Amino acid sequence: MVNYKNIGLVNSRGLFTDAITGGYAIPAFNFNNMEQMQAIIAACVETKSPVILQVSSGARKYANQTLLRYMAQGAVEYAKELGVAVPIVLHLDHGDTFELCKSCIEYGFSSVMIDGSHHDYAKNVELTAQVVEYAHQYDVTVEGELGVLAGIEDDVKAEHHTYTQPEEVEDFVKKTGVDSLAISIGTSHGAFKFKPGQKPEIRLDILAEIEKRIPGFPIVLHGASSVPQDIVAEINHYGGKLKDSIGIPEEQLRAAAKSAVCKINIDSDGRLAMTAAIRKVFVEQPAEFDPRKYLGPARDKLKALYVHKIKEVLGSDNKA
Ligand code: G3H
Ligand code: 13P
Ligand code: ZN
């Protein structure tokens, strides 16, 4: 058993309280490898922002959970080396079973998500409460989810959004004891969130209704990539074939960050940024074969993207 406090990580509780009071959101960026982790930490140190490092089940399979945990531990030291010991949360993204959450807690995670949103309400409550009971013994914070995002989530494909029902949130929070709640208000995972001709819009009215029912309770937005069109154009310019990639307009996320939304998950935009940089090197320098020569620019572009998100969308700069 590794206690996260012994490796310099923090849970999300204090960060969320400050974010709600201050009208900003904490960035939750996914990482699967060293370059992504370095870009996240460098961006957060430069902007003095707290950060949630997220690990998905896919990341665990890809990179090995031991390596990821030591990388997060290394991130704490790396931030100090870069000059600012920003608060770092190590969070399990989309945990789907009690056993997975338990294993992550034993591995040193300071926060876990139990995503029971694909189950019926009663089962979601039961599963979430079970994780909360275990996690709170170690002062690990827990994120639950109510409502289903359209698209692919945890290998489950949903054709349509099932928006979170505001009338359920109070009961869910009370019965489960969760520390934060992910909601479905029109965001979705990936780079194809809206069909061409559809108005890219999230339901800020449902968010306001939810806030009324649980005032001051930390709300989380998944699927919050904006799919920057200049980056998509760059990918396609360098031989990519992305068609009709549409994300959530940044101004809508900015509005959400000012409310009780205090954690915003961004992964796809980072993937796009890295892809654009790598494609550029491959096209412009076809003789290059040193991975540092294309992963380095990818890391730089990722860092610049995260600095932009922190300053212009989340507002978490200078909050560390
Ligand atoms: O919620 C999904 C995140 O973007 C992680 O994606 O499961 O492909 O690692 P992944
Ligand atoms: P995006 O695919 O919109 O980046 O969402 C990421 C996410 O929600 C991770 O949990
Ligand atoms: Zn998600």
Image (cartoon, rainbow, N blue to C red):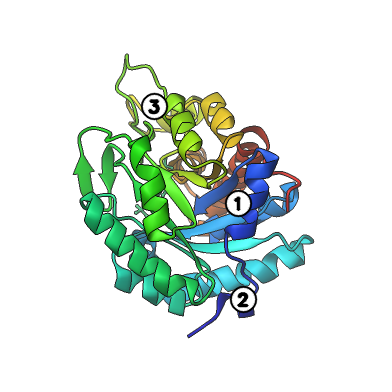
Amino acid type at image mark 2: Lys
Residue for point 67% across, 54% down: 42
Residue for point 51% across, 69% down: 140
CA separation in Å, label 2 and label 1: 18 Å
- Does any atom of ligand 2 lie closer than 8 Å to the CB of label 1? no
The disc, 2 or 3, on the residue closer to the chain's N-terminal end is 2
At mark 1, the secondary structure is: helix
Task: Bin the neighbour count of mark 2 within 10 Å (Cα to Cα): few under 14, some 14-19, many 20 and up.
Answer: some
Amino acid type at image mark 1: Phe
At mark 3, the secondary structure is: loop
Amino acid type at image mark 3: Ile
Picture quadrant where residue 50 is located: bottom right
**Observer-nearest residue: 213 or 106?**
213
The disc, 3 or 1, on the residue closer to the chain's N-terminal end is 1
Where's the C terminus, which quadrant? bottom right
Pointers 2 and 3 in contact (CB under 8 A)? no
**Which dot, 3 or 1, sits closer to the camera?**
1
Q: Give me the disc on residue 5.
A: 2
The disc, 2 or 1, on the residue closer to the chain's N-terminal end is 2
For residue 164, say whether it is visible: no
Task: Bin the neighbour count of mark 3 within 10 Å (Cα to Cα): few under 14, some 14-19, many 20 and up.
Answer: many
Residue under numbered circle 1: 16
CA separation in Å, label 3 and label 1: 29 Å
